[in-house]
Image (tube, coloured by chain):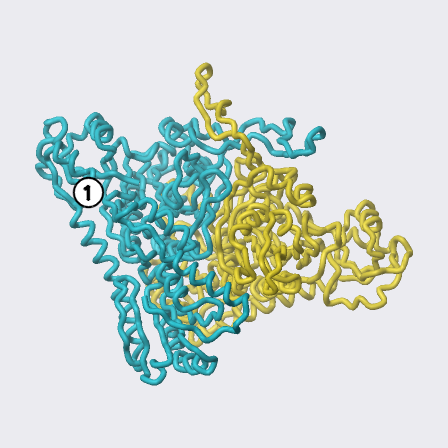
Chain colours: A cyan, B yellow
Amino acid sequence: MEIYETKKRPENEFFRIFAEITTYMAKELKNLTKRSENYSKWYNELVSKADLAEQAEVRGCMTIKPYGYSIWEKIQRELDAKFKETGVQNAYFPLLIPKNFFGREAEHVEGFAKECAVVTHYRLKVDEETNGIVVDPEARLEEEYVIRPTSETIIWNTYKNWIHSYRDLPVLCNQWCNVMRWEMRTRLFLRTSEFLWQEGHTAHATREEAEERAKLMLKVYADFVENFMAIPVIQGVKSETERFAGALDTYTIEAMMQDGKALQSGTSHFLGQNFGKAFDVQFIDQNNELQYAWATSWGVSTRLMGALIMTHSDDNGLVLPPKLAPIQVVIVPIYKTLEELQAIKEKVAPIISGLKNAGITVKLDDDDKRRPGFKFADYELKGVPVRIVMGARDIENGTVEIMRRDTLEKETLPLDGIVEVVTGLLDDIQKNCYVKAKAYRDAHIYECTDYNEFKTKIADGGFFLCPWDGTAETEAKIKEDTQATIRCIPFNVSQENPGTDMVSGKPAKFKALIARAY
Amino acid sequence: MEIYETKKRPENEFFRIFAEITTYMAKELKNLTKRSENYSKWYNELVSKADLAEQAEVRGCMTIKPYGYSIWEKIQRELDAKFKETGVQNAYFPLLIPKNFFGREAEHVEGFAKECAVVTHYRLKVDEETNGIVVDPEARLEEEYVIRPTSETIIWNTYKNWIHSYRDLPVLCNQWCNVMRWEMRTRLFLRTSEFLWQEGHTAHATREEAEERAKLMLKVYADFVENFMAIPVIQGVKSETERFAGALDTYTIEAMMQDGKALQSGTSHFLGQNFGKAFDVQFIDQNNELQYAWATSWGVSTRLMGALIMTHSDDNGLVLPPKLAPIQVVIVPIYKTLEELQAIKEKVAPIISGLKNAGITVKLDDDDKRRPGFKFADYELKGVPVRIVMGARDIENGTVEIMRRDTLEKETLPLDGIVEVVTGLLDDIQKNCYVKAKAYRDAHIYECTDYNEFKTKIADGGFFLCPWDGTAETEAKIKEDTQATIRCIPFNVSQENPGTDMVSGKPAKFKALIARAY
């Protein structure tokens, strides 16, 4: 990176130290572990240095910092609009779920009620002996509550009162909320005890309508993740083992990270009448007969932040597809005198208003307290898609320097027509993020029919399309031998004549997508 | 209400019963308790019948239903934009707070740590004897967690790592989230164990800047509540007794409900250095000296929904200021044949697109399963500001019937220019909601200097401006005698020569606003 000098500082001790600190910090910012050295360490450092999130002082929980949260807000806003286009409405159901609700659906309790936060008391008091704060033993709840790990139970308990006739159906509710699962090993965004998500819960009069809804929501997720987050995904259906606890079918979108591992990025479940029966949600159909309601549920979470980071970013930091970038264009002036700064500001003013009129988020960073070198490193780390630099020579020449974050290519261009150039560039970056990620993924999908070959190659990551006999035994053996799991039976892969199972040697039922996963 | 006939139904039993049911339901909908009979019952029924919220099967918690939530979303979106205009960013901090955090700020623990949900365990298991689900006694937490009643403690514990130099300040964070306070007596929206809110937490380098921010956010709240929710408020500062636990000053906006009681609608706290000291948040200032950071916090909650309902609504149901109405205009066709319906649809199509182009949310309700009478009652209950009805005669005459919800006035108008009429009408309804509420409130504010008179009059509700000697003793006596509390020392009331305290007979320090409150 080029070194730019800022205007001369007053020569006192304070500013000398200050300059040293910022130079040091700029170096530190750049000092990101390389992906090739240690992918996992690179991820952790990036999440921290790009100000996305940090470990909270609560076991396994995170603080989502303002910059990270502003990306999540963009995800939320876009998805929320897409849900509403399909007729979904938002609502809010309680955080706490009575313990006994979990016992109602047999598989669900196995999957969710085990590792969870349990509320047993409703009062603290000051201990008279130690003067410390203790739980008041007299304020014990008759029945304990669980902090929702997912809300099927409490929502279907509510639907019981909402649904009486076919005219009350469908019910299409979604909620944006926090959930808790007491995870033992946590990683920021990927697996935390508390996380943010949306959970959609729909009730239908017929099996067909519910199955259609489950598939529709998977499509909404896939479209969003591909077109907005620029992450290519494989759509498919989960094996019985990997299904949501209580579902008849779980549909999934699977993305490939740059280490070749899979990240399940969204799931949509066809729940049959399991919850309808467990919570006695019956309605009178058009033939005047009582029926149990059919259910779906579907969710994406702050995990998508992890997918975003690990799909696009590089050794310089975050790379953000422009549609998700909180700042899409940053303008950094380089100046020695306040007159120069003033001249630059006048030159860039029409660019700023032009970009804003085009709906682009632009920031002019004339912060005097940070040197340009620090700013450059920081905006690279934060993945700002386009950087515009204007210095003294640019004023004379009527030019600016433009850098695109995805390729780090720089170009000096005339001021005239710069708004159109930047608009086009943002489109191009959005497309390029997707194309690059897809090229990487496609180059790491392998057809494989030989188990020994599979066991060797899986060590380097990648997605494997393999014939599978459809049994849980084979699935378990693969997992035990290689830690890889069946991610899904992909929709877009021909399932005719899948061949011979590579583990059991029996006739295969499916061509399955197998990978190690987050 | 006029009775309209829908097209002839097939004469079978099913539709006969169906017609009876909808007629019964329409009557039931209208069968709302009158405010004058039982204000509290009227409120509860309205919240339920207008599909805003309902009691959940979790002690003191509510389910916010889609229609209620869509109003809350409008509140959120507008407030969020206003916060961001002042430089605030959103973030997310953990739901659970380690118990010991509450002990750090002496007053805060008194105010908040007492009645709260306490997480003591992290696992359930199946009991081998009973086969029921029980809390696993081996999964007891070393230190218990409290579900956040408010987040000053965990946020300031985090700020400790964010704030080192004056250059890191100000920090201006807000979060939209759920909180829990184990309330004994709960009422939907007004006081529930779990509720939704936003909590802003800012850190500043100087006392002046923090005080300014606390006042700025009160102004943001007041502007929003008055201009958007059409609720007039009185701004002021709380007495020491009524202050937020841990604050040096609490600013408040107080609204008057139609029963003359006060509803505290938003508060903004100047917290001094209390949390900075409790969590050791120090920074190096511009003179190279260590200082504790200065704090504010400010919040509004789903309580605003209660204020909205109780300020504007009438004996027919909800009245919504158009800016908050999820549906601003509903069009109900009245027809006997499908041809008539088709003709009406053609006539109203340009109205619908015209309204949509003007940014107005419009719904055409051609649902065949509900009769017009039912629809009318339902939309009145739900507070849709403008109703347009078109029947067979209207097609001939080129007219529509327009009803405004706030006054229930009906008018038959020519189709031409109807978009402009409706646009103007919505503006007028928004203004009228405010004017009406303000007129009601102003007519129920009394200057009072005689305690006996006060004790008599307070029984009928209203706000009282009274001279107060500034002591907690007087305040306590008023509360004990009358259940009324000092709502605030209003900003817009002259505090010169406040007179003689009506209780103690001592010289008054302030003119205080006193009322019974929710």
Q: Quadrant location of residue B493?
A: bottom right
Instruction: Give x and y (percent) for residue A100.
Output: 48, 27
Q: Which of A218/A206 is in front?
A: A218
For the C terminus of chain A, the image quarter is: top left
For image coordinates 28% across by 78% down, the residue present is: A413
For image coordinates 26% across by 73% down, the residue present is: A411
| Left or right relative to A199: residue B158 | right
Q: Name the residue under label 1.
A: A463
For image coordinates 22% across by 32% down, the residue present is: A482
Q: Is residue A234 above or below residue B3?
A: above
Amino acid type, mark 1: Phe
Secondary structure beneath label 1: strand
| Left or right relative to B315: residue B89 | left
Q: Quadrant location of residue A102?
A: top left
Instruction: Give x and y (percent) for residue A391.
Output: 37, 77
Q: Which of A270/B23 is in front?
A: A270
Q: Quadrant location of residue B203?
A: bottom right
Seen as rendered, the residue at the extreme right is B505
Q: Is residue B181 among what the camera can see?
A: yes
For the N terminus of chain A, the image quarter is: bottom left
Seen as rendered, the residue at the extreme top is B129
Q: Which of B310/B265 is in front?
A: B265
Q: Is residue B314 among what the camera can see?
A: no
